[in-house]
Image (cartoon, grey):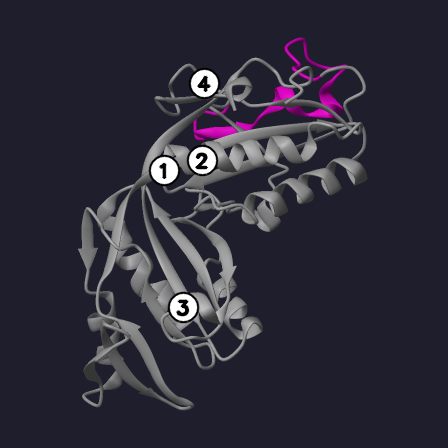
Amino acid sequence: MSKDKIVDTFSECFKMWFSRILITAIDEETALDAAQSTVGFATSIIMCSAEAGIERIVSAEETPDNRPGVIIQIWTKRSKLMKDELLTRISQSAMTAPTTSVFNYLEEGEKSEPIGKLISYFGDGHQKKITKYERDMWKIPVMDGSFLIEESFNFVKGIAGGLIILIGKSTKETLAATKFAIKKIHGSPAKAITSFPGGICRSGSKIGSKYTFLDESTNHQFCPTLVDEIEDILLPKGAKCVYEIVINAASEEDLKLAMKEAILAVKDNEEIIQITSSNYDGKLGSIKINLKDL
């Protein structure tokens, strides 16, 4: 891998709890609609109650009920927060979407919650516990048939906050390159998500602020409009646009693979001037992933 445009720095990562869920439906479009709704408003725990995103779309041959599906991940800072996130997101989004079924897609977990059983009470006494697809499931009557959901959902600690910053010559070309990097991440075997809209963040933040009521604020050192206004700018000459890719993954190996795929996707793009990351002297996390080692 050509490393001349890769800055010798590291991404400062940390552990969070995550669940891995499969949503299936009558067709891919419906499954994707359900998944997108279920992971909504979950870009960052800075202001959201969780972080969530789509891992990948799976074919009917890969799912328990032989229907198209979408794998999603939901992340929380503390394990006790996961129960409410799963309850609300599955019951108000996944269950409400036409024809869906929902499966736990994490075989082993450090913790587990009976989410399917709790949601089954919506059946108002008409729900039934069944064994199907070699799983304990709940069958809940709804207006287009039955909603099937696995009884229990597992969650474990994964690695969050893998950060790649792409610095380019123009907004159009930097955005195109970043989108291509996102596509490569989700086309890889990495069990990873990119929780921001389209996987891309334009408003990268730093820890701290001049205002005492803010814990985070704009990462001014990477703002092109401030090149001539501040002394501690970190942008190379010619930089006009900066985008972040923030990755959460099931393991450190998955995270490294996802980050590597993103870097490989853009390293030879002449419109990308620099590939870097941002860190905060251990204030954000204790896990370091060096970009040049990928």
List the residue tagged with mark 3: 63
Q: Amino acid at mark 2?
A: Leu
Q: Are marks 1 and 2 in contact (CB under 8 Å)?
A: yes
Badge 2 marks a residue whose secondary structure is helix
Q: CA distance from mark 1 to mark 4?
A: 22 Å
Residue 267 x %, y % = 69, 27
Q: Identify the residue shown where x is 22% and y is 69%.
A: 151
Q: Identify the residue shown where x is 34% and y is 81%.
A: 147
Task: Classify residue 173 by image quadrant.
Answer: top right
List the residue tagged with mark 2: 255
Q: Which residues are magenta?
A: 211-235
Mostly what secondary structure, the magenta segment?
loop
Residue 28 x %, y % = 55, 71
Residue 284 x %, y % = 39, 25
List the residue tagged with mark 1: 251
Of tags 1 and 4, which is closer to the observer?
A: 1
If you read the primary sequence from the N terminus, does the residue marked by circle 1 or circle 3 appear first?
3
Q: Identify the residue shown where x is 45% and y is 35%.
A: 255
Position of residue 275 in the picture relative to residue 80 (left or right): right
Vertical order, 24 against 46 (above or below): below
Q: Are marks 1 and 4 in contact (CB under 8 Å)?
A: no
